[in-house]
Every structure is written in C-alpha cells, then in structure tokens.
Image (spheres, rainbow, N blue to C red):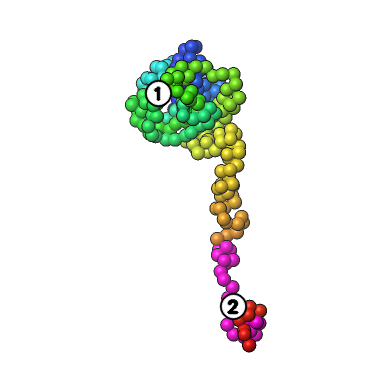
C-alpha cells in the first residue's frame, strides 16, 4: 500500500485557493484513476483506495485543516503499518514561481505548517512534491495570498500541471520519483529538458559526454595511441627528409 496525500483546507470557502493546490492535485488523480470509487470519510479526512499502476494506493485529503494535517496522515500510516518512504505528500510552495515544482525525500518544513505537522507525527523521511504558487513579495501579505483564489489567468499553467501529475501518478505510486520528475519537466519545460539532454547525452543512449556514439572504450583507446615510427630503414630516412630531420 502507498499513501498519496494532498494538503489543503476543507470546505467550499477554501476550494480553489492557492493553499489548496495539494487538494486540487489529488482531486485530479482521483478523477483520472479512481472515478468509479467515491470519496469516503476515514482517518480524519477523505480517502479513496484503488490500484494505480502496479500498486494499491490510498489517496488522502486531511480534513483537520492544514496546520493539523499530521494527525490524519499519522492515523492512516499506523493503520496500514506504512513506512515514511511509502508516503508521498503534495503541497504548495511560496518560494517557487507559479508552475514550477521540486521533488525531494526528507528535509525540513521550510515554514510550511502542514509539513511541520506531518513531520511532528511521522518524522521527516517521507517523499514530497512542492508545487510553486509564487510569493506576494511581502511577508505581511502571505496569509491573504495563500488563502486567495487562483486567478483565471493562472489556469494557463495550473491545468497542464495538474493534468501531468495525474497522468503520471503511477510513477509516484511505484516510487519512480526521478522518472516522474522527468515526465513533468519534459511536458511543462521542454526547453529545459532539451538543455539537460544535451548536457547529459548518455541519457538517450549516446554515451557519456565526449564519447563518440557507437564506439567502444577499446576502439577509442586504440585511436588515441601514438603511431609507431621506425627508427631505421627507408621509411625512417624518408620521414627525416620530410620533417627536416636530415640536414645532410
């Protein structure tokens, strides 16, 4: 069993707010992979269990409000006897531009109260997907900003981001986080993906940088060996005359 958690605040007043982007991602995963299975109340949240890819997955939206998210996550973890690496949490990140994302395992809470609560209940060693929402530019504006609704223009990046997360949710379920990140980068930042591919051609079968495609290490070594030049004989005499080595 794997647990994929989206963070947010319950209730219609908070639906569609920046702080609820984790809920929005989980809702899209549910729509794509679990639409035949309705949400039900459990573990102080709303859950849906279904197979995604090769894994049984429990989707969870805590109903404890953001600051107490750990109570819900901890209860589900204990019930299924999960380890922290079985848990994947999706949440908003002020310090990333809108539409950008970062993935990591473990680490601090970075001032995010939902992450602080989860780490307090289960420790820090769970997997995470941070979704950028941008920063208002003044810390005094942060509270109203994160609890404010996305603008219509935000849909230009928000909808494709949520769709890609849902399309590739099986990779999250199977613990293939680097492949998941590559899929999102390729879809959302194709130019960045191209630059990465050029800087690391070994990814597409072209071998390590500096190694000609299709040539073995042995062939390269042979090509780099100096040509043996005879010291005596007709060939040596001819080379001396061509290179100016013979002054007679």
SS state under label 1: helix
Q: Which residue is mark 2?
A: 229
Q: Measured from the top left, where is residue 222 in percent x and y?
A: 57, 67
| Residue 36 in sight from this viewpoint | no
**How far apart in space, not on screen, are marks 2 and 1 (Cα)?**
73 Å
Q: Which residue is mark 1?
A: 114
SS state under label 2: loop
Q: Measured from the top left, where is residue 177 in percent x and y?
A: 49, 36
The span picked out in magenta is 218-241
Residue 109's quadrant in the figure? top left
Quarter placement of the C terminus: bottom right
Residue 240 is a magenta residue: yes
- The mark nearer the N terminus, 2 or 1, is 1
- Pointer 1: residues within 10 angstroms few (<14), some, or many (20+)? many
Q: How many marks?
A: 2
Q: Measured from the top left, where is residue 79 in percent x and y?
A: 37, 24
Work out whether 81 lies above or below 62: below
* Residue in view at x 59 percent, y 73 percent: 227
* Residue in view at x 57 percent, y 62 percent: 220
Work out whether 198 lies above or below 159: below
Would you say 75 lies left or right of 37 here?
A: left
Quarter placement of the N terminus: top left
Residue 208 is a magenta residue: no
Would you say 27 lies left or right of 110 here?
A: right
> In front: 19, or 183?
19
Q: Measured from the top left, where is residue 125 in percent x and y?
A: 38, 34
């Amino acid at each position: 069993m794997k647990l994929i958690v989206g963070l947010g605040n319950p209730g219609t007043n908070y639906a569609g707010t920046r702080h609820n982007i984790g809920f929005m991602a989980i809702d899209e995963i549910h729509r794509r992979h679990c639409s035949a299975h309705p949400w039900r109340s459990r573990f102080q949240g709303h859950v849906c269990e279904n197979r995604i890819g090769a894994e049984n997955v429990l989707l969870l939206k805590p109903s404890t409000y953001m600051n107490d998210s750990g109570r819900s996550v901890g209860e589900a973890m204990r019930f299924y006897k999960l380890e922290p690496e079985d848990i994947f949490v999706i949440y908003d990140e002020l310090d990333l531009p809108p539409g950008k994302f970062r993935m990591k395992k473990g680490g601090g809470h970075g001032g995010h109260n939902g992450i602080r609560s989860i780490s307090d209940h289960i420790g820090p060693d769970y997997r995470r997907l941070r979704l950028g929402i941008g920063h208002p530019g003044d810390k005094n504006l942060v509270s109203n900003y994160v609890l404010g609704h996305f603008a219509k223009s935000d849909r230009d990046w928000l909808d494709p981001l949520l769709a890609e997360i849902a399309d590739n949710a099986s990779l999250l379920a199977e613990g293939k986080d680097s492949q998941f990140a590559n899929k999102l980068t390729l879809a959302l930042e194709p130019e960045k993906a191209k630059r990465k591919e050029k800087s690391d051609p070994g990814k597409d079968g072209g071998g390590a940088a500096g190694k000609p495609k299709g040539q073995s290490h042995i062939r390269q070594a042979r090509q780099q060996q100096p040509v043996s030049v005879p010291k005596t004989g007709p060939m040596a005499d001819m080379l001396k005359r061509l290179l100016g080595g013979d002054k007679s």
